[in-house]
Amino acid sequence: MSLVAVLLATVLLTLSPLEAALAQSRLDYPARAGGPGEPLVINGALDTPLIAPLLEDFHHRNPDLALRYNNLTTLAIYRDFLDDDVTPRPDVVLSSAMPWQYRLANDGHAQPLASEAARRWPAWARWRHELFAFTFEPVVIVYRRELAERFGAVTSHADLVDLLTGHRRALRGRVVTYDPATSGAGYTYAIEEARLSPRYWELVNALGGVDTVLAGTTRDMLEGLADGRYLIGYNLLGSYARDFVREHPELEIAVPDDYALVTQRLAFIPRDAPHPMAARRFLDYLLGEAGQRAISELTTLGAIHPALDGPGTANALRQRLGDALRPIRIGPGLLATLDRLKREALLTRWTREFQRGTIAADTRDETSP
């Protein structure tokens, strides 16, 4: 455990729950003597235990910079950015809410990065030279080993549909996934899968057929799987699930081999960044081989850099799954997820298909001997 992590854990033990929550929402790294007084401010939607190793590595390489990381929700990042009264203004914005990040950049709030690292960054992982993906995080299935022992392993969406339709009674109330109506991630995955898979609505129907529990976060789903409330969880964020499953041997994780959505965290430097030179140094680090190696070796976020091919990299996943990996595209299509009428239409159909599965399952139960 790093020194910062040890100190953070020690401090949290002495704080009230509210004080502990506030302490966990910010990380500070002072500059060495003679460095600038004002810190480089990074606003991000990434839990402090996940991002701390990356920030520590950057600060070790750049000790002349003071650094402050504010851990916020994706909604708070977006709203605070558009509120001119919120200070201090961020120098770098990191978020997994791809549609909101794209909207901010598309509306002219991001400044271009004209560095060698930016020019060499893969075209599929950036928008212009203003918005950059820096992680590669598959959306996964997690299930209890006892389910695999009883019904067989689940390695694809087709396996999942067969499992749900073939074992309704055994799985009723024991399956969990995101609620697309209340979870931004769940809605994004739903709209992407509806575009991607001709069998998606069949899967939603099957989920309804087993009275699938609808959750708000990957953490909620993982905790329910660990304590045995659920047997299988669908569409969990792999970067959070990997460490959790490693600590819970009763669980298995599967990246579907027919198709697997891949989400990415997006970074940009605001046009009004108070410390643009320091911000460019940080973004160059994120996109450079050193920063990407830190992501692959020190975190579960997944590195994109094309020169890296070991565990925890996009190249390693591609070698195993090939074209089954489907990164969510950074482009105008993301704005469709923010369109109110399109959102209402998708959620209406999702609810209808889910409820149709529930009604059909109830009818079969009533008529079965």
Image (cartoon, rainbow, N blue to C red):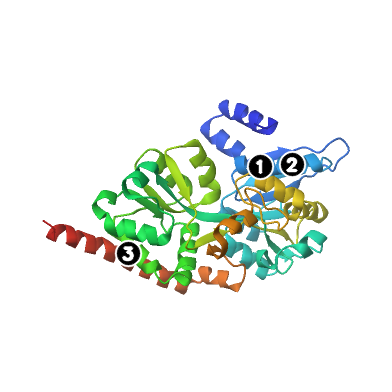
Q: Which mark is residue 73?
A: none
Query: Along the polypeptide, which appears first: circle 1 or circle 2?
Result: 2
Q: Is residue 207 among what the camera can see?
A: no
The residue wearing badge 1 is 298
Secondary structure of residue under mark 2: helix
Q: Gap between marks 3 and 2, in whole Å? A: 46 Å
Q: Which mark is residue 57?
A: 2
Marks 1 and 2 close (CB-CB < 8 Å): yes
Front-most of 278 and 364? Answer: 364
Query: Along the polypeptide, which appears first: circle 3 or circle 2?
Result: 2
The residue wearing badge 3 is 205
Return the residue found at the far left.
369
Tell me: 289 left or right of 101. Answer: right
- The residue type indicated by label 1 comes to Leu
Front-most of 18 and 70? Answer: 70
The residue depicted at 59 percent of the width and 55 percent of the height is: 317
Q: Is residue 298 among what the camera can see?
A: yes
